[in-house]
C-alpha cells in the first residue's frame, strides 16, 4: 500500500510525503510518530495495489503507537477463525 500524507510542522511549514509499506500498521505507526512529535496531520490517503484510494480519519491518530493493539486484534481474529 502507498500512503500519501500532508503534515504541518510545529513551526507552520507544510510537507507532502508518501511511502510504500506492505503492512497497514507501518503506515499507522508513521502517522502516529509525526503526531507525537508535534506535527499536525492535514490529510492521509492509502492507495492499494488495485489503485483504490481510501482517506484515513485524521482524528484517529493521537500519537500513541498501536502495533501491540493490532497484533492482539490479529491474534483474537485468528483464534476465532481457527478454534482448533
Image (tube, rainbow, N blue to C red):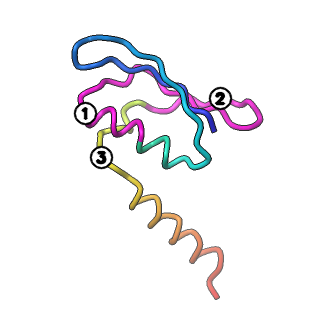
Q: Residue at x 56, y 68 (%)?
A: 77
In this view of the protein, which residue sits in the foreground, 43 or 27? 27
Q: CA distance from mark 2 to mark 3?
A: 25 Å
Q: Position of residue 5 (x, y in %)?
A: 48, 24
Find residue 46 and report its horizontal and vertical position in percent.
59, 32
Q: Is residue 46 magenta?
A: yes
Identify the residue at image location x=24%, y=28%: 38
Q: Which mark is residue 37?
A: 1
Nearer the camera: disc 2 or disc 1: 1
Numbered circles on residues, count: 3
Q: For mark 2, give the secondary structure.
A: strand
Quarter of the N terminus within the rendering: top right
Q: Which residue is mark 2?
A: 53
Q: Residue at x 40, y 60 (%)?
A: 69
Q: For the point 60% across and 31% down, which residue is it? A: 54
Q: Is residue 79 above or below residue 67?
A: below
* Residue 24, image x, y percentages: 54, 47
Q: Measured along the vertical axis of the image, is residue 17 above or below residue 2?
A: above
Q: Residues within 10 Å of mark 2 (few under 14, many from 20)?
A: some
**Element carrying mark 3:** loop
Task: Of the two numbered discs 2 and 3 on the same chain, state the one appearing first in sequence.
Answer: 2
* Distance CA(mark 3)–CA(mark 1): 11 Å
Q: Is residue 55 magenta?
A: yes
Q: Residue furthest top?
A: 13
**In the image, 45: left or right of 66?**
right
* Picture quadrant of residue 8: top left
C-alpha distance separating marks 2 and 1: 27 Å
Q: Which residues are magenta?
A: 30-57
Residue for badge 3: 64
Which of the 4 image quadrants contains residue 52? top right
Question: Label 3: few (<14), some or many (≥20) within 10 Å?
Answer: few
Amino acid at each position: 500500500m502507498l500512503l500519501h500524507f500532508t503534515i504541518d510542522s510545529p513551526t507552520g511549514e507544510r510537507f507532502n510525503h508518501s511511502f510504500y509499506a506492505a503492512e497497514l500498521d507501518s503506515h499507522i505507526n508513521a502517522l502516529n510518530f509525526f503526531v507525537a512529535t508535534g506535527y499536525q496531520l492535514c490529510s492521509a490517503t492509502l492507495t492499494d495495489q488495485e489503485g483504490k484510494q481510501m482517506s484515513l480519519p485524521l482524528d484517529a491518530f493521537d500519537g500513541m503507537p498501536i502495533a501491540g493493539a493490532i497484533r492482539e486484534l490479529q491474534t483474537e481474529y485468528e483464534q476465532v477463525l481457527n478454534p482448533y
